[in-house]
């Protein structure tokens, strides 16, 4: 399998080359040359397969033989070394929990998969140190930091917006040390993301620094998120109903992965792009006009993205056909007031504690089901442990959350970060460090 740039001005590369580059030289996102279709037998035998087998068979055609199968199986096994439980809330609504990994966020799978792919690549060649440059609006940074922590030959530089991530998220970014460096940006996530993209096309940096990205713009991060949808489909509570999946969406890598799984043959009937007030994509699905805008801070901060990078991949999946996309994806957006009300309602009616992102996903699913017949049942993705947003969750449900044991020690650690204001300062750091 080869990959091409969606800006169509760079040469094609194989899987590992695309992972190592992160972004194409023309600043385009990589996209597979073709989308493989899974055999009917794969779905007929899905109930008999474990998570590792499912994930291995779905990712294998995308890797294209550049990682031997025995190593790829181990990489997938390591990436999925925790549970993905489904918790029914009503007879038609269930939560698919993706936060049982080491950093309590759905991004652990993609980060661990990518880290191990890069470790394999580095072991094959004697190259200069690889620098992972990543922007985060919340959970990505912690997942990447954990996934790459102490990996030989790899340095991680994480950009995060000052004052716009939760305390726990900040601790996960800024307390590891070793090969992990956190840069605190005086701005918003979109500023961080733009700096990362600028660094990849800067000729001075390209000549001096062996650079790649671990955001969902990287194909290893993006494609590994398909695994959730196959696992969720296998374990869905109402297998005789049509399935709709509601995805809390920020940079849109997770939704894009689900849509890729559908293109491969996974019979999910419909998807919901559930956002906060950063609603560029729901507005597009309403009007057909895409107008990115500056991001606005919300309680669901990992979705505070005004110009989502992966939306171009979603459009490509549908060959830029607006009407085909609308048949498969609905978009809804919600305010912080809506989110807090949902947290309270979910807890009052079911006893379930959601986080703000999951609450937005629940709202989107509930709205869709209210407007459609009972042939549908749905999953909403619960993407982070509620303890990561304890202040807003506890305020909504009037109950104190229990801190998981693995986090108690983390909260005691001292923060270490470097402040930067602009791209010039990022460039200086990369060239001098």
Image: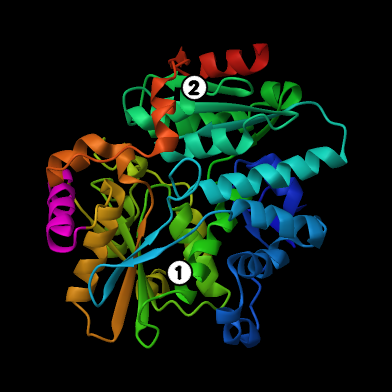
Q: Could you classify mark 2 by the number of other residues whose Cα lies within 10 Å: few (under 14), some (14-19), or many (20 or more)?
A: many
SS under mark 2: loop
Q: CA distance from mark 2 to mark 1?
A: 33 Å
Against 394, is 253 above or below? below
Q: Which mark is residue 232?
A: 1
- Residue, disc 2: 175
Is residue 344 found inside the magenta-colored segment of the image? yes
Q: Residue at 54%, 18% (x, y): give it.
A: 426
Residue range (magenta) = 336-351
Q: Earlier in the sequence, mark 2 or mark 1?
A: 2
Q: Please tell me which residue is depicted at 44% across the width and 70% down the height of the picture.
A: 321
Label 1, secondary structure: give it: helix
Front residue of 206 and 171: 171
- Queried whether the magenta region covers residue 46, the answer comes back as no
Q: Position of residue 73 (x, y in %)?
A: 73, 60
Assign the C terminus to one quadrant of the image: top right
| Residue 42 drawn at (x, y percent) | 63, 81
Which quarter shows the N terminus? bottom right
Q: Residue at x 41, y 33 (%)?
A: 407
Dominant secondary structure (helix, strand or loop) of the stretch shown in magenta:
helix
Answer with left or right where residue 362 lies relative to residue 187: left
Above or below — where is 140 with respect to 269? above
Q: Residue at x 64, y 68 (%)?
A: 58
């Amino acid at each position: 399998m080869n990959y091409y740039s969606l800006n169509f001005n760079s040469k094609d590369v194989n899987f590992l080359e695309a992972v190592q580059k992160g972004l194409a030289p023309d600043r385009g996102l990589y996209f597979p040359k073709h989308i493989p279709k899974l055999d009917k037998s794969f779905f007929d035998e899905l109930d008999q397969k474990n998570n590792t087998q499912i994930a291995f068979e779905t990712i294998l055609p995308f890797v294209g033989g550049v990682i031997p199968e025995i190593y790829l199986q181990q990489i997938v096994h390591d990436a999925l070394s925790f549970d993905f439980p489904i918790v029914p809330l009503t007879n038609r609504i269930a939560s698919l929990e993706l936060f049982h990994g080491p950093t309590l966020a759905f991004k652990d799978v993609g980060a661990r998969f990518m880290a191990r792919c890069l470790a394999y690549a580095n072991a094959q060649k004697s190259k200069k140190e690889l620098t992972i440059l990543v922007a985060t609006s919340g959970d990505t940074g912690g997942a990447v930091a954990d996934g790459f922590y102490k990996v030989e030959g790899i340095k991680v530089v994480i950009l995060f917006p000052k004052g716009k991530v939760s305390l726990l998220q900040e601790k996960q970014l800024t307390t590891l040390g070793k090969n992990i460096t956190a840069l605190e940006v005086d701005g918003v996530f979109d500023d961080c993301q733009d700096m990362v993209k600028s660094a990849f096309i800067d000729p001075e940096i390209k000549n001096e620094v062996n650079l790649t990205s671990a955001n969902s713009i990287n194909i290893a991060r993006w494609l590994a998120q398909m695994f959730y949808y196959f696992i969720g489909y296998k374990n869905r509570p109402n297998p005789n109903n049509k399935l709709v999946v509601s995805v809390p969406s920020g940079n849109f890598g997770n939704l894009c992965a689900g849509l890729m799984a559908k293109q491969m043959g996974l019979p999910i009937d419909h998807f919901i792009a559930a956002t906060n007030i950063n609603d560029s994509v729901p507005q597009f699905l309403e009007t057909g006009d895409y107008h990115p805008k500056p991001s606005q801070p919300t309680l669901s901060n990992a979705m505070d993205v005004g110009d989502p990078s992966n939306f171009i991949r979603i459009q490509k999946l549908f060959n830029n056909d607006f009407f085909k996309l609308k048949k498969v994806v609905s978009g809804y957006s919600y305010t912080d007031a809506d989110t807090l009300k949902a947290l309270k309602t979910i807890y009052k009616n079911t006893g379930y504690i959601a986080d703000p992102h999951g609450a937005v996903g629940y709202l989107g699913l509930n709205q869709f089901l209210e407007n459609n017949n009972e042939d549908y049942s749905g999953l909403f993705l619960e993407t982070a442990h509620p303890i990561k947003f304890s202040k807003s969750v506890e305020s909504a449900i009037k109950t104190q959350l229990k801190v998981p044991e693995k986090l108690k020690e983390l909260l005691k650690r001292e923060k270490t970060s470097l402040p930067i204001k602009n791209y010039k300062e990022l460039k200086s750091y990369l060239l001098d460090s």
